Image (cartoon, rainbow, N blue to C red):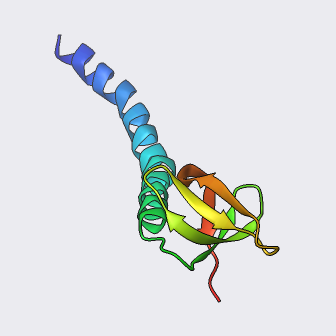
Amino acid sequence: MEGSSTDLISSLLPLVALFAIFYFLIIRPQQKQAKAHKEMVSNLKKGDKIVTNGGLIVEVVKVEDTYFLVKNSDGTEMKLIKEFVAKLLED
């Protein structure tokens, strides 16, 4: 009986190690990046220039609950859902 539990532990050890490596190299960095992005989006304010997921550079005019009212370079205003903000454009 003692030998079979040792075999089970030794066969599961590589699987546990693989999961730990997977977690620290892939899952954890993605969670940190998602948290940082969510914090960046929540801190956006009027006048900030942002890049959308579509590659447009726009300026925030008004912050709403689920979207931003933004304007592009020719002054056209449009609504942008918050999830489609790619990054804050630093001057």
On-image quarter of the N terminus = top left
- Residue furthest to the bottom in view is 91
- Identify whether 47 is placed above or below 31: below
Q: Nearer the viewer, residue 27 or 31?
A: 31
Q: Quadrant of residue 19?
A: top left
Q: Quadrant of residue 16?
A: top left
Identify which residue is drawn at 39% across, 44% down: 20
Number of numbered discs on residues: 0
Q: Quadrant of residue 58?
A: bottom right
- Identify whether 87 is placed above or below 79: below
> Where does the image place residue 91, in percent across and percent down from the top left?
65, 89
Question: In this image, 70 relative to 44: left or right?
Answer: right
Q: Nearer the viewer, residue 86 or 13?
A: 86
- Residue furthest to the top in view is 1
Identify which residue is drawn at 57% across, 78% down: 48
Question: In this image, 20 relative to 50: left or right?
Answer: left
- Identify whether 77 is placed above or below 67: below
> Where does the image place residue 42, in percent across and percent down from the top left?
42, 63
Question: In this image, 77 relative to 64: left or right?
Answer: right
